[in-house]
Amino acid sequence: MSGFTQDWEPVVIRKKAPTSAAKKDEKAVNAARRAGAEIETVKKSTAGTNKAASSGTSLNTRKLDEETEVLAHERVPSELKKNIMQARLDKKMTQSQLAQLINEKPQIVQEYESGKAIPNQQIITKLERVLGVKLRGKK
């Protein structure tokens, strides 16, 4: 057995270098501080904001900002709302009764009579049929 010699060369096993996500981990940063390693902190200019990567105003954004046209939905004409209200009162119906007959919510009838609704030809047709009057005149 004296012919054998032992090889006592040191074997070094290394861990992989930490990934960028692991470097940012709070535990890893604290461990590096304890070990005395240098830690660099960089403040990102758009951190914590909801800005796009390109913070400069894009062409579309500038076009929208320069737009001056006033856009609004068409509302129920005052003549139509008066006609609906008059026809409903002539039939001695409440708004909710009328709404039930045309299979719509009472809020819809209320919006039409107050002039807040955006005109829908299908609903106007239902109202004409139930109330028995022609609401749409010449257009």
Image (spheres, rainbow, N blue to C red):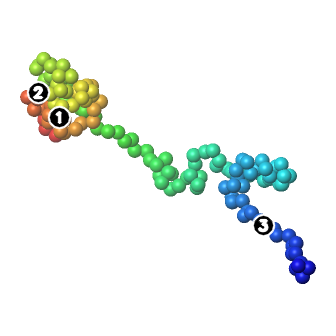
Q: Nearer the viewer, residue 67 or 57?
A: 57
Q: Amino acid at mark 1?
A: Ile
Mark 3 highlights which residue? 13
Q: Which mark is residue 35?
A: none
Q: Between label 2 and label 3, give the one nearer the viewer.
A: 3
Q: Which mark is residue 131?
A: 2
Q: Position of residue 20 (x, y in %)?
A: 69, 58
Q: Residue at x 85, y 70 (%)?
A: 10
Q: Nearer the viewer, residue 67 or 136?
A: 136
Q: Amino acid at mark 2?
A: Leu
Q: Does residue 55 appear anywhere in the picture?
A: yes
- Which element carries disc 3, helix, strand or loop? loop
Q: Residue furthest front?
A: 1
- Which element carries disc 2, helix, strand or loop? helix
Q: Amino acid at mark 3?
A: Ile
Mark 1 highlights which residue? 124
Q: Residue furthest left?
A: 132
CA distance for labels 2 and 3: 90 Å
Q: Nearer the viewer, residue 128 or 32?
A: 32
Q: Residue at x 87, y 73 (%)?
A: 9
1 and 3 marks in contact (CB < 8 Å): no
